[in-house]
Image (cartoon, coloured by chain):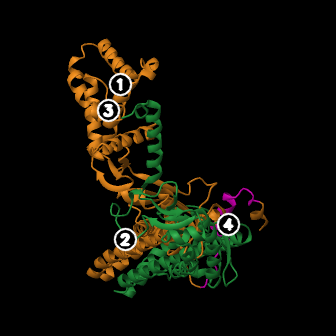
Chain colours: A green, B orange
Amino acid sequence: MSRTVRNPIVLAFVAILLLVLIGSTLAVVPETKQGVIVRFGEPQYIVNPYKRGETFGKTQAGLIARWPFIDRIEWIDKRILSIPMERQQVLSTDQLRLQVDAFARYRIVDPLQMFISAGTEEKVSDQLKPILGSALRNELGKRQFAALLSPERGQMMENIKTALNRVAGQYGAEIVDVRIKRADLPEGTPLESAFQRMRTARQQEARSIQAQGSKQAQIIRAEAEAEAANVYAEAFGKDPDFFDFYRAMQSYELTFINNGSGQEQGRSSIILSPNNQYLREFQGRR
Amino acid sequence: MSSFFGWGARLGAMWNENKGGPWGPSGGGSEGGGGDGGSGGGPRSPWGQPPRKRGPRGSGGPGSVASFDDFLKKSRDRFGGRFPTGGGTGDGRPYWLYGLGVFLLLWLVFTSFHRIGPQERGVVTLFGSYSRTLQPGIGFTLPAPLESVQKVDIQAVRTADIGSTDRAQENLILTGDQNIIDLAYSVRWNIKDPQFYLFQIQNPEETIQEVAESAMRQAVAGVSLDDAIGAGRSEIEQRVQILMQQLLDSYGAGVRVLGVAVKQSDPPAAVNDAFKEVSAAQQQAQTYMNDARAYALQLTAKAQGEAAAFDKVYAQYKLSPEVTRRRMYYETMERVLSRVDKTIVEAPGVTPYLALPELKRRADAAPAAPEAAPAR
C-alpha cells in the first residue's frame, strides 16, 4: 500500500465516493410503491408492479440495484387511492335536483402507461375527477329520483364504474369501486318543499290517528252497550211479566221519591182515586 | 443521522467484501463483536481499522491495556505512527472512535430487539419488503437499515364518528320513502391484518369514514322513515356493519368492523313540530279509548249488577209469586206514598177541592209566593 492510500483524506474521499455510488445504485422498494426505472427520461422497466392477488412478502418489493446516475426511479403508489370529488348537482329525469357526493377508489395497475400519460398520481386523480363527475351526471340523469334510493343503485354504480374504467385504462389505472357518499336535496326550495311534504304527511297521520282513536272509542262504547243489553235480556227474559212489575216498582220509587236527593225538582203530589189498587183494602171491601 | 450510520454499517460490510470477507448480516455480526471488544480494549471501527491489523492488535491490544491513560497513549502512538501528517489532531480521535463504537453497539441493540406489547403486532420489512409479523413479546430483527419494524396496535378499538348529536349540525339522509332524517352514528373498528392495513390503502381512516357514509346511506335508503327513526334502527346498524365489512374486505383493507351504533336518528328540526303533533294525536287517541273503556266497564258492571239483583228477587218470587208480588207492591207504595203529598178523593163523581195542600206548601216554601196565594 502506498502512502496516498493510507492518507485519511484520501480514505474519506474514497469512502464518500463509495457511499454515493452505493446510494445511487441500491434502492429500497417498499411494499406500498412501485417504481418506474427511467434512463435519460426513457422509461425502461418497472420494479414491484401491481399483480392481482399477490401476497405481501411475495412481491418484488425489497432491495434493487440499478445503474447509478443513469437510472432514475419514479415512485408510483401501489396502494388503493381515492379520487375526491366535489359535490355535484344532478338532475334526475323527473326534474328533481340532487346534490351528490361520490368517491372512487382506484389503483395504478400499469405504472408505465400511467407514467407516460400522466406522470404523477395527482394528475391521474385530476384527470379522472371531471370524468367521474360527468359519468355520475349521465347515469343519474337517466333515472328517476326514486331509483337513487332503490336497490337499482348498485347497478348504477356498476355503470359509472365501467364508464370511468374505460378512461382510467388510458392512465394505467383501474377503478376499484365507485360509491355515492351523500345524495341530498339541495338547500332552499327543494329541501323546503320536501320538509313541507313531510310536515303535511305527519299532520295527516296525526289526524288519522285521532280519528281512529275516536272510532275505536265509539266501538268500545257500543260493544259495551250491546253486552249490557244482552245481560239484561238474558236475566229479564226469564219472566217478562214479573220484570214488568219489578221494574215498575223501581221506577216508581225513583221517580216519586227523587232518589232521596231531596232537591226542589218536581215534588210529587198524588191524587188517589178510591178505586186505586192500593186503597182496595182501605175501603173495607173487596 | 441514523441514515448516515446506516450507510456507515453498509460501507463496513462493503469493505469486508473487498477484503474477501462475508457480506451482509454476518458483517453486521462482526461489528457487534468489535463493539463488545471495545469496552475492554480499544475501539474498533470496521472501516477505521482494516482487518489486516487484527494480528498485531490481538497480541498487544485488549490484554495489555492497564489503564485508560495507557490506552490513550497506546492509541496515540499507534495513530501517530501510522499517520505522521495527522499527528496534530491525533489526540481527539480515540474518544471519537470509542464513542462511535458505543453508539454502534447501542444502535444494534435498540434496532434489533423490539418489545411488542400484548395489544400490538410488529410488521417487519426487510428492505421494504414484508417479511413477517412479530407477535407480542421481545422480537428480534436484523438491525435498522436492513429490517425495520412498524408497531401496530390491533386491539385498540377506534371510532369513526359521523354526524353529530348537536342540533345545529344536521347530517341529513334520504330514506327509502323520500323523507329526510337527521342521523348521527359511530363506527367502531380495529385492525385485523396489520400488513394489509399498512400496505393496502393509502388513507385507511378516511376510507373507513367514506365507506361508512356510503353504507349508511345505502341502508337508510332501503327503509322507510318510520323504521329509520324507530324500530328499524338495530337492523340498519347490522346492515351497515355487514356492508362495510364486505366493502373493506373487497379493498383488502385489513380492517374489522366491530359495530355500528346509531346515536341519533330524528326527524330534522324543521319538521320536528309536525312529528310532535303525531305523538300528541296518539296520546289523544289513547285518551278517547281509555274514556270509552271506563264507560264500558261501568255499563257492563251495572248491567250485571242489576241482572244479578233481578235473579235473586226472581228466585224468591218463584217460590210464592202472588204473595211476593203483593208484598213488593205494598212496600214500594209505602216508600213512595210516605214521601209525597197525597189527596184521596172519596166518592166517585166529586170534583176535588182545588186548594190543594200543594199550593199551601208552595206558599210556605217560597217567601215571594204569599201575595200570589191570597190573590187567588
The residue at 43%/65% (across/down) is: B237
Q: Which mark is residue B98?
A: 1
Q: Provide residue B94's location: percent of width, then percent of height.
A: 37, 22
Amino acid on which disc 1 is placed: Tyr
Q: CA distance from mark 2 to mark 4?
A: 116 Å
Residue marked by disc 3: B105
Tag 2 and tag 1 share a subunit: no
Q: Are marks 3 and 1 in contact (CB under 8 Å)?
A: no
Q: CA distance from mark 4 to mark 3?
A: 132 Å
Mark nearer the viewer, 4 or 1: 1
Q: Chain of mark 4?
A: B
Q: Chain of mark 2?
A: A
A110 or A180, which lies in front? A110
Mark nearer the viewer, 3 or 2: 3
Residue marked by disc 4: B359
The answer to if B361 sits in the magenta stretch is yes
Secondary element under disc 3, as helix, strand or loop, is helix
Residue marked by disc 2: A53
Counting every numbered tag in the picture gives 4
Nearest to N terminus: mark 4 or mark 3: 3
What span is colored magenta in the figure? B349-370
